[in-house]
Image (tube, rainbow, N blue to C red):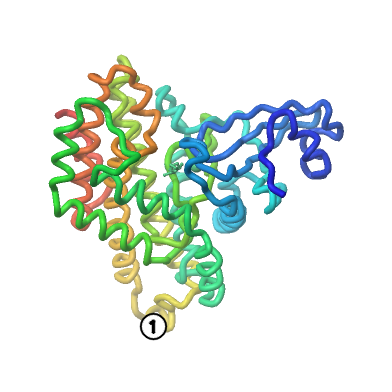
Amino acid sequence: AYEALTVETLPNRLSSVEVLAGKVGPDPSVWQVQEVGDGNLNLVFIVSGPNGAAIVKQALPYVRLVGDSWPLPLYRAFYEYHALTRQAARDPGSVPELYYFDETQALIVMEYLSPHVILRRKLIAGERVGGLAEFLGRYCARTAFRGSELSMASPDKKADVALFAGNVEIPAITESLVFTDPYYDAEMNNHTDGLDPVVAKLRADVGLKVKAQQALQRFVSNTETMVHGDLHSGSIMSTGSDSRVIDPEFAQYGPMGFDIGMLCANFLMAYFSQPAHRGDDLAAYQEWILGVITQVCAVFESEFRHLWKTERTGILYPAALFEDQGHDSSPACDAVLAGVWRDAWAVCGIEMHRRCLSLAHNADFEEIADTTVRAPLEARNLMMGAALIHAADTLAGAEDVCNMAREFNGK
Ligand code: SR1
Ligand code: MG
């Protein structure tokens, strides 16, 4: 039967997991175990010993952030395991190496990334990460393209959509906390003192709520690729020059623009929160963040177009209809990408809202202790989120988005 691990019980309970003993050391009595989970849901242990270290991640049967009043199925570890295997195949080297999975115990043993730290911590500390935009742009394009019928054989895609359709409660969190709760007085919501007038303005904007619900409709009904589902800066670990994506327990089949939209939102929130974290180098660091957004989007586009030309092996836009007849298929690629960006910018604005208004906030703003400093920065972020949602169909590209951010940052 399932039993949550503790720092004390882990060595005995996992002593027979050979791959763990191989990574850490053969004698569990000398393993050192630290619980380091700082997310909203799970237990995360670093297990170290004479041979090295490994991560043991175990799902809890409830939401850690809230407590056992909010039960949550253990099966999310199953989907995380399957998502990790697909991400590793679709963008090799982008995720931690998987060592072992125990479905009953809802636990995954995987590579200990060191000296990587959570990217959000680096952004708050004003650190730069080499190759970040290239890595993330490629990751988003490869996983979007290779998880869709642009690349996958139709029966494989259908089987995978069916597999992930068993994950009900986890996407439901996103459906409510991300897409819906920010726009009404939901029970678990909270926001910083001083934001009431901005919040009232957003909730009075019927057009905005329609657009947010349209984005939700696409999120729940458009299963075009396997998305990470929670690609924020806390789901990325980096050194000064290397990055990996972690934590795909929110994986589901959804719109191709979802991950890159959520990702850009988290860079924008890092941008808007910087005045509280930086001194002299504020302007330069904020511009570095905007440069990352621009570059992520440019790399996404160029990688997606490259895959379109070289790996279009699925049922969609087959060469038989285009290249084989001497027709250029790039207008079709343009049209697909236009849909991706429309979805991405809408999700981006919605994520900017939910992290200030719904249950789960982010450290970029939350660690600004003085709420008279925090509230105006969050207000800029909220207003830009609304502008993005309204303009999602018509934005020319990431440069437009960055110019919009510069404008709101000056307000
Ligand atoms: C109750 S879970 C709240 C949030 O934590 C996860 O990391 C997801 O972002 C989710 O929306
Ligand atoms: Mg997570």
Quarter of the image with the C terminus is top left
346 shown above or below 158: above
Residue 165 lies left or right of residue 178; in this view the side is: right
Residue 27 lies left or right of residue 363; in this view the side is: right
Callout 1 crowding tier (Cα within 10 Å): few <14, some 14–19, many ≥20: few
Per the image, the residue denoted by label 1 is 321
| Residue at the image point whose x is 86% and y is 31% from the top | 27
Q: In which quarter of the image is residue 343?
A: bottom left
Q: Is residue 322 visible?
A: yes
Q: In which quarter of the image is ligand 1?
A: top left
Q: Which of 274 and 62 is in front in this view?
A: 62
Q: Give the farthest residue toward the right.
A: 27
72 shown above or below 123: below
86 shown above or below 152: above
Q: Give the farthest residue toward the front.
A: 69
Q: Can residue 290 be seen in this view?
A: no
| Residue at the image point whose x is 40% and y is 76% from the top | 317
Residue 141 lies left or right of residue 76; in this view the side is: left
| Residue at the image point whose x is 22% and y is 53% from the top | 392
Q: Give the farthest residue toward the top.
A: 280
Q: Quadrant of residue 212?
A: bottom left
Q: Where is residue 335 in the image (x, y as percent from the top left)?
A: 29, 67
Q: Nearer the viewer, residue 329 or 278?
A: 278
Report whether the residue tagged 1 is closer than 8 Å to ligand 1.
no
Mark 1 belongs to which amino acid?
A: Leu
Secondary structure, mark 1, is: helix
Q: Nearer the viewer, residue 191 or 400?
A: 191
Q: Position of residue 363 (x, y in %)?
A: 40, 29
| Residue at the image point whose x is 37% and y is 53% from the top | 175
Q: Where is residue 384 in the image (x, y as percent from the top left)?
A: 21, 40
Q: Position of residue 255 (x, y in %)?
A: 38, 61
